[in-house]
Image (tube, rainbow, N blue to C red):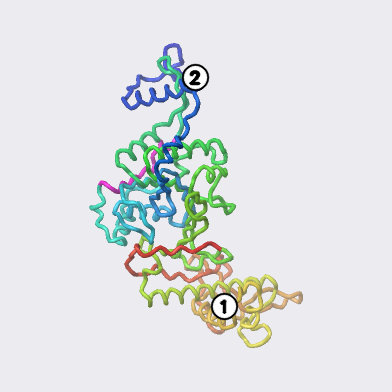
Amino acid sequence: MSSLPDGEGAPGWMQRPPKRVSQADVAWRAKQAERVQAANDGLPMQTLDLAELAKEPAEPKQFAIERLAPVGEVTLFTGPGSAGKSLLAQQLATAAAAGLSCLGLEIQRGPAIYLTCEDDAKQLHWRQEHICEALGVNMADLAGTLHLISRRGEIDNEIVIEPGGTIDGMSYPDRPGAAYNRLAAMIRVTGARLVFLDNVAHLFPGNENDRGEVTRFVNLLNRLAGETGAAIVLIGHPNKSGDSYSGSTAWLNAVRSQITLDNERDGDGMVLDPDARVLRIGKANYARLGDALRFRWHRWAYILEADLPADMRAELDATIRATGENTAYLRCLAAATDRKKAVSENPGTNYFGSVFPKMPEAKGLKREAFERAHERLLAIGEIELDAKLWQRENRAWKFGIRAVEKCTDPLHRPPAPTRTGLSVNSACTDPPSNYVTTGAADWPAAPDDELDWEPAE
């Protein structure tokens, strides 16, 4: 062990100011000294007493959030930056504090902590007001059980392991830093059973690709979860390669549970409904792997689609179907254009209703679906008719249907095309939209229905 430079003779910048030692610190030092002494004496490791364990039945793993967050463990919660992980975390913490189920998930009742390093107090207030409205909870009733913490802009959020050394002639091993101690104290003082930490980029100061550093960091939180009995949910982002986490595989190996949140996407990765979400179990040592739970965004909270009335669900289904048809139409149109095959709305061999259904990009859609999409896209200005597509070798232009490029500058935005077609300003560079935005469902949430998990394909 290296000696900590806190005495005379050390350079001034290395000398430490006098430090007050708390009773907790004294107790920790004594405990660590016993461990060091036991290791030095070569004492054997402690084993389970199987004779005593045989006298009572084993208990299954308990969950703070049904199937998602096991008690006394760290769960890794990942997803794209726009998926809404922070909102879902705050909503689940609220449900725990209020003693409610949420999205059909059974949640262990008890104090909960949501700590964020990215959102300020005003944003937490905004979300909390809407979450309480959706869950039917009086915000004031959560005082003392729901603990919202904003660490945005603070420079000492990193959970580090300080190196050990020699203090007062006694050698000590490495120990957690100040941020860890503050977090541990908060969990113990509040008695929190569910803790969300948002997010790992602010809390972990090491190299995310270093297996050893990642493992030590996660194990430190695992120790805290085990000592306090809390379920700790660590929020992170995936990488650009499409993995469900960023960095070393140790992030996944060191935790016992991992879940991901994303928009609902089709087989090509396109978002057809911007309000739809899907939560998947990516790793599950204590639950079934690969299950998925689907729900919707609504007024800054999440609800199950089953909570909508029948007529609204039917309208939603129609909107999703229309969006899918529009996306398929634009996908086929782009592919046909790339292959130098012009399509037209006029009957004949180039009629889009005859060409598109035969293309692999159609994904099985029939002529009627493309005709419906054609009328919708024409009405909202997503396509134009009889447009210039490319020049032939004889410099003559080839005409046909073309997707309208949208521009962000209203002064250069072209008028909506008519049945005769209009030219498009060449300054327009925005890509065409692939879906119709419908907004969130205008209906109060009732997030306590029976859970409807779907097996992964």
Rendering coords of residue 250 (x, y %): 55, 42
- Name the quadrant containing residue 314: bottom left
Q: Is residue 294 visible?
A: yes
First in residue order: circle 2 vs circle 1: 2
Rendering coords of residue 306 (x, y %): 39, 69
Name the residue at the right extreme.
Answer: 393
- Name the quadrant containing residue 276: bottom left
Q: Is residue 345 above or below residue 1?
A: below
Name the residue at the bottom extreme.
Answer: 347
In front of the other: 17 or 175? 175
Q: Is residue 197 visible?
A: no
Q: Is residue 316 above or below residue 448?
A: below
Which amino acid, mark 2?
A: Asp
Query: In 3D space, how far apart are the residues under numbered discs 2 and 1 (Cα atoms)?
Result: 83 Å
The overriding secondary structure of the stretch rendered in magenta is: loop
Please tell me how crowded label 1 is: few (under 14), some (14-19), or many (20+) other residues with Cα within 10 Å.
many
Residue drawn 50% across the image and 75% down it: 321
The magenta stretch is 144-159
Rendering coords of residue 248 (x, y %): 57, 43
Question: SS at mark 1?
Answer: strand
User: Disc number at residue 384?
Assistant: 1
Instruction: Verify CB contact (< 8 Å) between mark 2 and mark 1.
Output: no
User: Disc number at residue 41?
Assistant: 2
Which amino acid, mark 1?
A: Glu
Position of 417 compared to 150: left or right? right
Rendering coords of residue 370 (x, y %): 57, 80
> Between tags 2 and 1, which lies in front?
2
Residue drawn 48% across the image and 73% down it: 320
User: Disc number at residue 228?
Assistant: none
Question: SS at mark 2?
Answer: loop
Give the tally of numbered discs: 2
